[in-house]
Amino acid sequence: MRQMLVVGFIVLSVALWQGCGKDNPLGRVAVSGTVTLDGAPLESGSIMFAPTQRGPVLTGTVIKAGRFEMLTEKGLTPGEYAVKINAPDMSKPTSGHEPPPSLIPPDWSNGTGHKVTVTAQGPNEFTFDIKK
């Protein structure tokens, strides 16, 4: 058991060390785009990209004034991703024990209805037009 922990630590250390290098060993690419809700830029929210197959990395970022951007060092590896967008409706009162309701319909907020393909060549600029 101890040997497995040591091996795991070494593998994790090497992966982290390589990820910090300038040579981009994972092959990440920049990803950016726009998000609108019923035709207007989404004021604020978050976007996550979940790999649909084993290998690519899971990552996300914030949406501000209808835009999101992930630079290469925090970007995605080429592959197919499910897109999950969330934005709480802060205008609705809550009891304090539950989160505010979402502005985003379930097919976008649960990450099951929309996919994108990220390519090594790019450009990886995506437009998501959400309708309530």
Image (cartoon, rainbow, N blue to C red):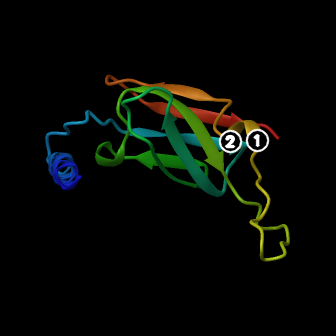
Q: Is residue 10 above or below residue 95?
A: above
The one nearer the camera, 40 or 104, is 104
Q: Position of residue 35 (x, y in %)?
A: 62, 42
Left-right relation of 53 to 22: right
Q: Position of residue 104 (x, y in %)?
A: 74, 47
Left-right relation of 132 to 51: right
Q: Residues within 10 Å of mark 2 (few under 14, many from 20)?
A: some
Name which residue lies at 78% across and 77% down. 96
Name which residue lies at 18% across and 46% down. 11
Q: Is residue 76 above or below residue 42?
A: above
Residue furthest out toward the bottom = 96
The one nearer the camera, 17 or 128, is 17
Which amino acid is tagged 2? Asn
In the picture of the structure, the residue carrying the numbered disc 1 is: 106
Left-right relation of 112 to 95: left
Q: Position of residue 26 (x, y in %)?
A: 25, 36
Name which residue lies at 77% across and 61% down. 89
Which amino acid is tagged 1? Pro
Q: Residues within 10 Å of mark 1 (few under 14, many from 20)?
A: some
| Residue 92 figure quarter | bottom right
Q: Position of residue 124 (x, y in %)?
A: 43, 30
Query: Element under label 1?
Result: helix
Q: Please say if the residues under marks 1 and 2 sit with CB atoms less than 8 Å apart.
A: yes
| Residue 115 figure quarter | top right
Left-right relation of 1 to 129: left
For residue 110, which numbered disc appears in the image?
2
